[in-house]
Each structure stands twice: as structure tokens, then as C-alpha cells.
Image (cartoon, coloured by chain):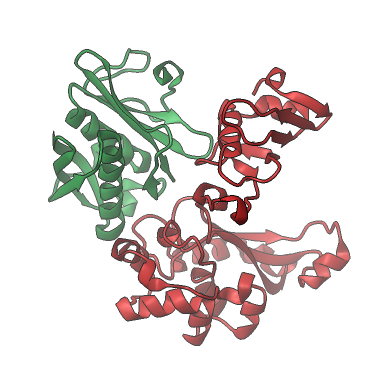
Chain colours: A green, B red
Amino acid sequence: MILHTAISLHGRSSNAPLGTPPHAPSWEHFAHQADIGVRGYGHCPAEAFSQAALALIAVITDPRCIEPHETLTLECRAPDLELLLVDWLNALIYEIATRHLLFCAFDVSIKGHHLHATAWGETIDPARHQPAVEVKGATLTELHVEAIEEDLWMAQCVVDV
Amino acid sequence: MDPARLERHSPDEWHIPPSGNMRVPAILYAPEDLILGMDDKVYEQLVNVTTLPGIVKAAYAMPDAHWGYGFPIGGVAAFDADAGGVVSAGGVGFDISCGVRTLTTGLQRKDIDAVKVHLADTLFARIPAGLGSTGILRLNAQEMNDMLKGGAHWAVNRGFGEMVDLERTEEHGHMQGALPSAVSHQAKQRQRDEMGTLGSGNHYLEVQVVSELYAADAAAAYGLHLDDVVFIRANHKIQSLRRALMYFKFITPITILISWL
């Protein structure tokens, strides 16, 4: 299982100090030689997707410095849950690139393989957000969405930076 | 990667013999210390490549091989179209349209030594780069299609470069048979704001000095001499479109710099 080899590059969210076992809700990054992996944990797939999205934002900047001034709704459909995660992250990457937005909070619901989400955030302010990189796309590499324990879902993939 | 998993054929040549679904062997070229430093994913991905239809002779890994998407980066394979061969996007590489360009400046180290801090600040201020940056170019849908079809020729025609720049660009800056209609609306939208910018992420403009010549004749052919100051644009690309444009190879942002210089 990949969990044991995971290293945290930016740290988990504040409710998950380093060295603690995975728990919901939380997110983390995992190493990839050329790019970076994003991973979310949740009590259900929707919460894991929401946390994976926070991990995505955390590749660019500290989500805690983003203000929820704007609201956006997103819809995604895919043949299965794993491809739905890729579509979801790519939908966010598209909004970041074309609307110049960064997000700090997500409300995700998943029915079957249909995702509906609300995202809160604000326009990128390079001076304040100090964006480290642009995430170019979510990939199928290390793509897993699964229940790793009872009541604990994990959603992860490598993103191209 | 554990060398014990490989058959050693020479100090720098290692084989993975075919087994299971492998159609051909995998061959790695690297000294033992580089093999030891390679990620196990290189082994896994190389073996996966050997299972692709139409593969010829072997799947190869160069000494710089590392974990990629589908193919290892530094992986090499040939596919026979007449034997059901495939075109693999991972093999072509998702960094297609990336490249490196060296711009000669006509300046020498002594010309910029006194002003290099100011030069760096000015370049930083004048050249849009990084997430959220935008350039001065705003293309409508028709202009975007013209740019995609015309490549660097389009940029030169718009006054962002000179014909001589095209002579030093792959395919002279223009791939034949471009089909802008095959590119999605979303991909074009993502490209719109990035036109005329350095891009973001791992893209750099470097000011470098030629400090040593290994092959004077080759350097002269490129117009490079000792102590010359050059601008190097690394990993520039039509970034957002690259996934859609597996067959386009040309340069746009660089031409902005040429005109500025």
C-alpha cells in the first residue's frame, strides 16, 4: 500500500500533524520524481475529493491565505469514481487558469458518478499568494479512489506541474 | 532499482528478458550507480512499454531514465505500423512544444557586468511570467486558429520576430497539416491569457555567459564565442495547448523577447 511510503512535502492540513495515521478529513502530498502527488482523505468519496482539491491548491499556495470572496459551481460526470477525480481536479485547474482564481473551500456531493460542487475563493494576487507553480493537469498516474478502512476514503493522483 | 533484477550484458548494458505479456526485452544503458539511483517505477514502466503492440526489438532506457507518464522519461521505443504499431502519447512526451532556445545578444560579459542587477530587475519587470500573468496579446477565435496554423510564421508576420529566427527553429517554426479545429475550446481558452508570456512553472529565462568552448567549430556555427552573453529560454512552450497539440511544434512567446531585445 502506498500510504506507508508517503512523505509529506507541504505537510498535512493543520488537523493532521506529521506522523499521525491518515484520518478524515485531511490531505497530503506524496513524492513523484518529476511532479507531485495530491491525496485527500474523507469519510466518504465526496469529502476525500474535497480534501484532494485542497491538496491541489496547496501545491500552488497555502490555502489558508485565500479568502472566500467568490463562489463557483461545477459539474462533472465520468464513467467511474477514479476518472471522476481526474475530471474534478482538471475542472478546477481550468478555472484557475482561465478565471485566475484560487480556492480555499469546497462543498462536494457525488451521486453515482456525477459530481456537483461549490468552490469558494478569490482572484490570484501574486504578491499575497506567491504562487509557486502552475498545475497543468491531473493525470492517471497513481490514480486511486478507494475505501482504505471502514469510514475512511482516499482519493489521489499525480498532478503535472 | 535493484541491479539484481536485471541481466548484466556489459558494464553499462542491462536487460530485462521477456516474460508474461512482454513482447520484447527491455534494455537499460547506465552504469551501476545510476541503475541503483533509478526509481522502481522505471522498471515497471519500461516493462509496460514492451507490451505495446508493434514494438520493434526492445524498449530502451537511457541513463537519465526516470518515472514518467506511461513511458519512463528517457525511454525509447520504435513501433512498426505494419505490425499493428501504436502511437503512444506518453512516448511522444507531454512536454511536446517545450524547448530550449538560445538568443545571442552581441554582448560580452564586460558589457553587462556593471549593470547585471538592473538588467535582471528589468527583465523580471518587463516579461510577464508566473501563474496569473497575462501578455499584451489578446487573440480572438479566428486569430487563435491562424496562430495555431501558422506557428512561428504567424508571429513573424505580426512583427514579433524576423525571418532569420525561423531558420533556427525546428521545422522552421511551422508544422504542416495543422488542424486547429481539432483543438478543444477549453484548450484554446487556457492558451488565451498565456500568449506572449514566459508561462509559469518550470520555465525560465536565463542570462548566461559562454565560459568554456568544448568544440570551437560547432560553437561558431551557432554564433557563440567565449565570453558571449546569451539569453536562454528553457522549457518554453505553448503550455496549455500542449496536451491537445501532440503534432504542433513552434514557438510563440520567444518571439516577443526577440522583438524586445
Q: Is residue B20 above or below residue B77?
A: above
- Across and down, in percent, residue B168 comes to 67, 74
Q: Quadrant of the C terminus of chain B?
A: bottom right
Which of the image's four quarters has the N terminus of chain B?
top right
- Residue B59, quarter of the rendered image: top right
Q: Is residue B84 above or below residue B58?
A: below
Which residue is at a point 44% across and 74% down the rendered structure image? B148
Residue B182 is drawn in which quadrant?
Answer: bottom left
- Can residue A135 be seen at all in this image of the molecule? no
* Left or right placement of residue A87 versus residue B171 in this view: left
Q: Is residue A30 left or right of residue A117?
A: right
In the rendering, at what x and y percent does residue B210 appear?
76, 60
Q: Is residue B244 left or right of residue A44?
A: right
Residue occupying the point 50% across, 41% down: B69
From the viewer's side, name the closer residue of B112 and B211: B211
- B150 w.r.t. A46: above or below: below
Q: Nearer the viewer, residue B27 or A155?
A: B27
The reply to whether residue A149 is in sight is yes
Q: Position of residue B134 (x, y in %)?
A: 36, 66
**Number of on-image labels:** 0
What residue lies at 21% left-to-right and 40% top-to-bottom? Answer: A104
The x and y percentages for residue A70 are 13, 51
Q: In which quadrant of the rendered view does residue A109 lie?
A: top left
Q: Residue at x 80, y 32 (%)?
A: B12
